[in-house]
C-alpha cells in the first residue's frame, strides 16, 4: 500500500493504492463532499485479494487534494473532475482501469467512460444518475431536499460539522440495516480532522451538470449499475434508466438500501462487482 500526491489537470490529487500495481487496476471515485477514506476497507481488501490493484483518491476541493479557494472565479465541472481522474491514471502509469464511482463519483465515472473510453475496462455506476434534474422521475422529498441544501452552506465548527453530517447520513440510510452510529461518527470525525473543506462546491457542480443520456446511449463499455431501492436522493428509477440506456448494462438493485454503503451489504456487493469486472476479457 502506498499514498502520495500527483499533479493532474493543473491541480494536485491525493491518492492511495492497494495491492500489486502490475495487476489490473480498479479506480474508486467517491461522491460529493466525501473523501477517499469513505471507501471502506471491507470493500477494497476482497477486491485486492481477488487479484486486483485498487486506487482510491480525494476529488478536487476536498481532503488532501487541491482546494478551490474561489469557486466563482475558478468554477469547475464534472468534466474537469473526470479529467482529474484521467490525469491521475497518467501520473500512476495506469493505461486502463475498471472504474467504479459512487453518487457524484458515478457521474464522474460515466464521464470518464464517455470522454476517455479507451482508458476504461469496465464501468460501475453506483447509487448515481445520468442527470440530477430529470423532471420525469420521482424527486427528493422536502425533508431530504432540506438536508441536501444544507450541504451548500455547512457549519464552521468541528462539532457542528460532524453533527450535521451525521444528520445527513441518518436521513439517507435505508431500512435493511441498522444505522451504525458508532462507525459513522468515527468516519466523520476522521474526515473532518483529515481535510474537510467547508467551502466545497461539489453539490453545486452536480446540480449544474447537464444530462448525459445521449452520450450514455453510445457507450460500448461493460457496465454495471448498482442502486438501492430506498435511495432518497436519486430514486432507484435513476439506476433503472441508466441500465436501460447503456447498451448491455447489468442492473443490481440493493433491496432496502438507501444512499449509502452499509457494511452489511458489502459481501453481496463485492461478489457482484467481482463477477462484473472478472467477465471483462
Image (cartoon, rainbow, N blue to C red):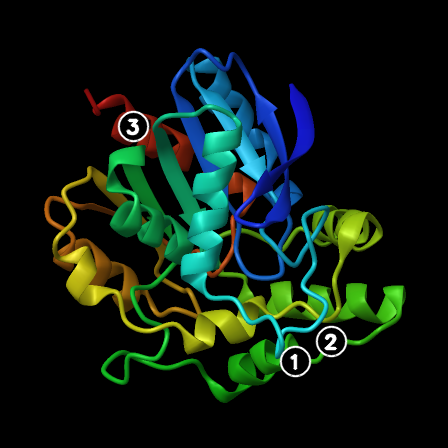
Q: In this figure, which residue is indicated by the disc labeled 3?
A: 277
SS at circle 1: helix
SS at circle 2: loop
Residue that extends furthest to the bottom in the rendered view of this protein: 142
SS at circle 3: helix
Label 3 and label 2: CA atoms lie apart by 37 Å
Q: Is residue 238 above or below residue 23?
A: below
Rate crowding at label 2 as few (under 14), some (14 to 19) or many (20 or more) other CA atoms within 10 Å. Answer: some
Point out the tag, 3 or 1, that comes first from the N-terminus.
Answer: 1
Q: Which mark is residue 278?
A: none
Rate crowding at label 3 as few (under 14), some (14 to 19) or many (20 or more) other CA atoms within 10 Å. Answer: many
Q: Position of residue 170 (x, y in %)?
A: 63, 65
Q: Going 38% across and 49% down the picture, which residue do you hit? A: 109
Q: Going 40% across and 41% down the picture, which residue do you hit? A: 100
Do tag 1 and tag 2 residues touch (Cβ < 8 Å)?
yes
Q: Which mark is residue 150?
A: 1
**Relative depth, front residue between 206 and 138:** 206
Q: Which mark is residue 154?
A: 2
Label 3 and label 1: CA atoms lie apart by 37 Å
Quadrant in which residue 131 is drawn: bottom left
Q: Position of residue 11 (x, y in %)?
A: 62, 49
Q: Position of residue 16 (x, y in %)?
A: 63, 30
Q: Going 79% across and 68% down the picture, which residue do you hit? A: 161
Quadrant in which residue 149 is drawn: bottom right
Point out the tag, 3 or 2, that comes first from the N-terminus.
Answer: 2
Q: Going 56% across and 66% down the picture, which residue do you hit? A: 202
- Left or right, 53 with respect to 281, comes to right
Q: Is residue 21 visible?
A: yes
Rate crowding at label 1 as few (under 14), some (14 to 19) or many (20 or more) other CA atoms within 10 Å. Answer: some
Amino acid at each position: 500500500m502506498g499514498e502520495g500526491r500527483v499533479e493532474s489537470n493543473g491541480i494536485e490529487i491525493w491518492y492511495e493504492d492497494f495491492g500489486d500495481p502490475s495487476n489490473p487496476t480498479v479506480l474508486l471515485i467517491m461522491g460529493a463532499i466525501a473523501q477517499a477514506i469513505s471507501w471502506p476497507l471491507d470493500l477494497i481488501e476482497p477486491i485486492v485479494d481477488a487479484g486486483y490493484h485498487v486506487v482510491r483518491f480525494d476529488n478536487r476541493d476536498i481532503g488532501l487534494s487541491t482546494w478551490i479557494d474561489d469557486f466563482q472565479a475558478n468554477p469547475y465541472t464534472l468534466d474537469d473532475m473526470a479529467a482529474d481522474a484521467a490525469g491521475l491514471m497518467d501520473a500512476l502509469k495506469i493505461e486502463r482501469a475498471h472504474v467504479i464511482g459512487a453518487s457524484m463519483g458515478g457521474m464522474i465515472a460515466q464521464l470518464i467512460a464517455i470522454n476517455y473510453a479507451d482508458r476504461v475496462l469496465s464501468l460501475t455506476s453506483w447509487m448515481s444518475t445520468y442527470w440530477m434534474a430529470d423532471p420525469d422521475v420521482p424527486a427528493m422529498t422536502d425533508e431530504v431536499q432540506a438536508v441536501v441544501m444544507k450541504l451548500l452552506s455547512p457549519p464552521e465548527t468541528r462539532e457542528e460539522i460532524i453533527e450535521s453530517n451525521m444528520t445527513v447520513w441518518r436521513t439517507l440510510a435505508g431500512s435493511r440495516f441498522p444505522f451504525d452510529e458508532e462507525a459513522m461518527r468515527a468516519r466523520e470525525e476522521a474526515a473532518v480532522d483529515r481535510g474537510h473543506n467547508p467551502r466545497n462546491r461539489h453539490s453545486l457542480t452536480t446540480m449544474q451538470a447537464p444530462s448525459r443520456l445521449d452520450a450514455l446511449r453510445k457507450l460500448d463499455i461493460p457496465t454495471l449499475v448498482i442502486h438501492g431501492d430506498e435511495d432518497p436522493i436519486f430514486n432507484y428509477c435513476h439506476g433503472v434508466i441508466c441500465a436501460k440506456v447503456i447498451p448491455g448494462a447489468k442492473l443490481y438493485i440493493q433491496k432496502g438500501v438507501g444512499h449509502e454503503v452499509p457494511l452489511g451489504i458489502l459481501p453481496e456487493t463485492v461478489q457482484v462487482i467481482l463477477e462484473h469486472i472478472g467477465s471483462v476479457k
